Image: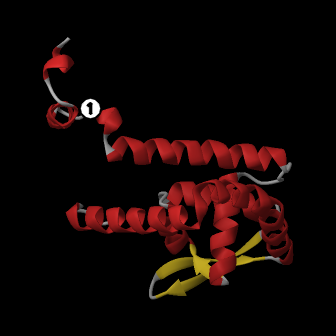
């Protein structure tokens, strides 16, 4: 009833001034997108009957892109604590996808992770299997949409990094 007494532009202005709910916020939208992305990835890995999990694949892909890296750096890139990263690495080592070489840096042991041939083949094989499915999703967003989304997320991440007291 109230809407009849206002023009469309006035009503829009009033509605925009209402307090935004958390589920309408960008924070919720990012979290929801992340959750859907994880579900999507898990489904893709089940569909292609992957021998490793999505998280294990990400770890292999990161190591593949960096040729070798220490467990601490891998943990930072995976955004996981070292204990979780250690479990992922131990599982990948047991399955024969990586080797873990221990060296000393000062008095501290460093666990260097190196992909085995089996690990390299698995990363390449899974990328090839997943590419058409991922491209299909990206096609729905369009090239411009993907670029804008990526740029917006990077900007959001950088703004949030500046606001965080304890850096990740």
- Colour pattern of the rendering: secondary structure
Q: Nearer the viewer, residue 51 or 14?
A: 14
Residue 57 is left or right of residue 124, and the answer is left
One can see residue 101 in this view: no
Q: Pinpoint residue 124: horizontal percent, then vertical percent.
A: 81, 72
The one nearer the camera, 19 or 9, is 9
Tell me the quarter of the image containing the N terminus.
top left
Residue shown at the point (80%, 76%) measured from the top left: 116
Res. 130 in view? yes
The residue under label 1 is 21
The x and y percentages for residue 61 are: 68, 70
Left or right of residue 154: residue 41: right
On screen, residue 129 versus residue 72, left or right, reads right
Q: From the viewer's perspective, tell me whether residue 142 is left or right of residue 3.
A: right
Q: Residues within 10 Å of mark 1 (few under 14, many from 20)?
A: few
- Of residues 129 and 75, the one nearer the viewer is 129
Q: Which residue: 31% across, 69% down?
A: 158
Q: How many marks?
A: 1
- Looking at the rendered structure, the secondary structure element under dot 1 is loop
| Residue 118 x %, y % | 86, 71
Find the residue positioned furthest to the top. Answer: 1
Question: Relative to 88, is 62 above or below?
Answer: below
Image position, residue 42 (x, y; %): 69, 45
Quadrant (top left, top right, bottom left, bottom right) of the C terminus: bottom left
x 83%, y 53%: residue: 51
Q: Residue at 50%, 71% (x, y): give it.
A: 72
Q: Quick one: which residue is furthest to the bottom in this view?
A: 106
Q: Quadrant of residue 60?
A: bottom right
Residue 36: quarter of image: top right
């Amino acid at each position: 009833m109230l809407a009849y007494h206002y023009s469309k532009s006035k009503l829009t202005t009033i509605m925009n001034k209402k307090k935004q709910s958390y589920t309408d916020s960008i924070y919720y939208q990012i979290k929801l997108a992340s959750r859907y992305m994880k579900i999507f990835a898990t489904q893709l890995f089940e569909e292609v009957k992957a021998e490793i999990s999505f998280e294990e694949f990400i770890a292999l892909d990161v190591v593949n892109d960096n040729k070798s890296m220490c467990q601490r750096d891998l943990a930072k890139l995976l955004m996981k604590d070292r204990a979780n990263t250690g479990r992922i690495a131990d599982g990948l080592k047991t399955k024969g996808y990586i080797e873990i070489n221990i060296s000393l840096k000062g008095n501290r042991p460093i666990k260097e992770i190196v992909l085995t041939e089996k690990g390299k083949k698995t990363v390449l094989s899974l990328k090839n299997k997943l590419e058409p499915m991922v491209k299909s999703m990206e096609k729905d967003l369009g090239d411009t949409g993907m670029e804008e989304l990526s740029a917006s997320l990077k900007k959001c991440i950088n703004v949030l990094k500046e606001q965080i007291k304890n850096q990740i």
